[in-house]
Image (cartoon, grey):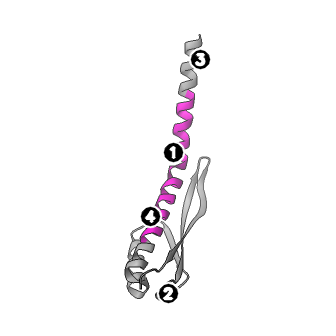
């Protein structure tokens, strides 16, 4: 009887973990996408030495490839001087699917990053 109870308990725990993974996998995917975009935006700003028109075009081409609504806010545009600080915010809006709600819910996930220009 003890072996049967342990098997049922293991099955229950495994199924509950599987169901949780199904519900939260999209959120993890959105978080990873936001982190990747933030790091890529910082890299583009570093290469272009600021949030210039070339950087804007490259960032817009990155955003256009996504199926979610993405907004990138940069607090300083143009060329950067030595020691300038740029704050980047990446916001992703996505429709979270809930287990017992067909329509879902619009959710915003934001992540911020900073870049300090140390290039002379």
Q: CA distance from mark 4 to mark 3?
A: 44 Å
Badge 3 or badge 1: first in the primary sequence: 3
User: Mark 2 or mark 3, which is nearer the start of the sequence?
Assistant: 3
Q: Nearer the viewer, mark 2 or mark 1?
A: 2
65 vs 26, left or right, is left
Q: What SS does tag 4 mark?
A: helix
Q: x, y (%) of residue 31?
A: 51, 59
Task: Give the Cα distance between marks 3 and 2.
Answer: 63 Å
x, y percent for residue 12: 57, 28
The residue identified by callout 3 is 5
Which image quarter holds the N terminus? top right
The residue beneath circle 1 is 22
Q: Residue at x 53, y 80 (%)?
A: 85
Disc 2 and disc 1 in contact, CB within 8 angstroms: no
Q: Is disc 3 placed on a helix, strand or loop?
A: helix
Q: Are marks 3 and 1 in contact (CB under 8 Å)?
A: no
Q: Which mark is residue 77?
A: 2
Residue at 53% from the left image edge and 26% from the top image edge:
11
Badge 2 or badge 1: first in the primary sequence: 1
Query: Which residue is identified by label 4?
Result: 36
* Labels 1, 4: front one: 4
Crowdedness of circle 4 by 10 Å Cα count: few (<14), some, many (20+)?
few
Quadrant for residue 56, please give it.
Answer: bottom left
For the residues labelled 1 and 4, the Cα–Cα distance comes to 22 Å
Q: Secondary structure at mark 1?
A: helix
- Magenta residues span 12-40
Q: Quadrant of the C terminus?
A: bottom left
Q: Give neighbour class at mark 1: few <14, some 14-19, many 20+ (Cα, 10 Å).
A: few
Residue 44's quadrant in the figure? Answer: bottom left
In depth, the one of 23 and 113 nearer the eye is 113
Q: Main secondary structure of the magenta part?
A: helix
């Amino acid at each position: 009887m003890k072996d049967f109870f342990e098997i049922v308990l293991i099955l229950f725990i495994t199924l509950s973990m599987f169901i949780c993974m199904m519900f939260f996998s999209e959120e993890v995917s959105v978080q990873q996408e936001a982190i990747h975009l933030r790091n890529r935006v910082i890299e583009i700003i570093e290469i272009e030495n600021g949030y210039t028109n070339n950087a804007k075009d490259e960032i817009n081409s990155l955003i256009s490839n996504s199926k979610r609504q993405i907004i990138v806010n940069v607090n300083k545009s143009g060329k950067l001087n030595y020691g300038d600080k740029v704050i980047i915010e990446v916001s992703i809006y996505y429709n979270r699917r809930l287990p017992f709600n067909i329509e879902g819910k619009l959710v915003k996930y934001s992540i911020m990053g900073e870049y300090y220009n140390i290039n002379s």
